[in-house]
Every structure is written in C-alpha cells, then in structure tokens.
Amino acid sequence: MNQNQDNTQLENSQYFQDFVGDGHLMINYQEFDQSFVDRLVEKLRALYEPDLFSHSYQTMAFAERMAEKYGVDQGRTKVASLLHDYGRVFPPQDLVALVQEKKIPCTEFELETSDLLHALAGPELIRENFGIWDPQVLSAVRKHTVGSIQMFPLDHIVYISDKVELYRSYPGVDILRRTALEDLNEAFKLCYKQSLIYVLTEGKPLHPDSCKIWNQMLQHLQNFSSSYSG
C-alpha cells in the first residue's frame, strides 16, 4: 500500500542512535526540521479532504503550544499531530487487509470498530508512504484513539490536542484547553473522562481497555508523566 509515496522520505530528517543505561539498549529515532514539516503540510493539504486537513492542522497548532509548555520535541510533535488521522485517507476494508497482512497486534473488537482502524493501521502506512519510523511519532499515532496503560508525553499531547483543537466545539472544551496548558496529567484525565462519557452517551461499544486505562490512571497517576505537569 505505497500510495502517495513521499519521494524525499528522510531527506529533511536526521537519523540518531542513543544508548540507554549500560549501552546495550539502542534506540533509533529521527529529528524533523521545519523544512520537513512545511513539505509535509503541503503534501497533506493536497491529500486530505478539507475538513480532515483543517482538523489535522489545528491539532498540530495546539500540540505545538503544549510541546513548548512541557518541553517535548517540536518536530516530532508537529509530524505526529499532522499524521495522527492519516489512516482515514484509506477505505476501511483496505485498513483491515493491511492489519491482517502485516499481522499488526490488535483485538477483534478493534478490527470490527471502524473508528479505531485508522489508528491501528496508521503507523504502518506512515512508515511505508513517508519513510517515517520514529518510535515516538508512531506511538502517538497508534494511541490517539483509545490510549494505553503506558503513555509518554508526546502520546498525551497528540491525544489531548486531537480532542481540544480550535475547531472542536462541545460543552467544557474551553476548560480542557486551559487545563491542557497548565497540567498535562490533569488534562489527559479530563479528556479521557470526556471521551468515555461521549462513547457511553452515544450508545457506542466501549473498548475493553478503556476501563483498565481509567482505573490505572486514577490509581497510579504519577506513572502518567508526572514530571511533565509544568
């Protein structure tokens, strides 16, 4: 599924390797300069439907403010937020086929829930079509719908920004926006609560992990990046 392959791929990003701890664990990651981000914006402007582009751009704009507040890398933040809904470009049947072909870990619930497919397949599509394999970027894309027991600051930022970007309009969103720029943990908790209420109010099925994530958050809030509360 190499549709819209970015010919430049890594031309405007840099490759790094870090050794952690005793030097035996190596983490590969990328850094994205503003030129890369600008090119990505223009590519997505042509690729996305207008509403999807506006949402993604506004998600990036809010995420950028959060990244500055909490000391998270701006390049990764912009790329992850721009691409968090990239999977929505593809028909659901293609996403299911990709998940099955690549043996992407998932549950039957996720495969059968159309609103979750784009996050499941998104990281693989981004890797194939843009040459982006940075683990933090792909993690944020994967976790922006349901979340996860283990989430990092960039995961939180993309999750929250997706819910509170400028074009979002629902009761309480102003409070969420303000909290997002004051306390990362509290903002994630409030956004997650709002998402649960929405799903239940709409009579939609609740992801089996949602209750686990919520309970874990309440019991061990310090594990959700407590050092990034400003």
Image (spheres, rainbow, N blue to C red):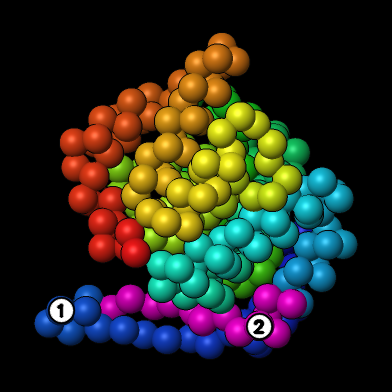
State the extent of the magenta-drawn residues as a range.
Answer: 26-38
The answer for how far apart the CA atoms under marks 1 and 2 are is: 31 Å
Q: Can residue 205 be seen in this view?
A: no
Q: Residue 162, percent across and down?
A: 59, 48
Is residue 192 or residue 205 the one in the foreground?
192
In screen coordinates, is 30 left or right of 117? Answer: left
Label 2 SS: helix
Label 1 SS: loop
Seen at 45% across and 68% down, the residue is: 69
In screen coordinates, is 52 left or right of 143? Answer: right
Q: Residue 32, percent across and down?
A: 57, 80
Q: Which of marks 1 and 2 is nearer the N terminus?
A: 1
Tell me, for residue 21, which label it has, or none.
1
In screen coordinates, is 71 left or right of 95? Answer: left
Whether 97 is among the magenta residues is no
Q: Mark 2 points at which residue?
A: 34
Assign the C terminus to one quadrant of the image: bottom left
Whether 35 is among the magenta residues is yes
Q: Residue 70, percent across and down?
A: 41, 67
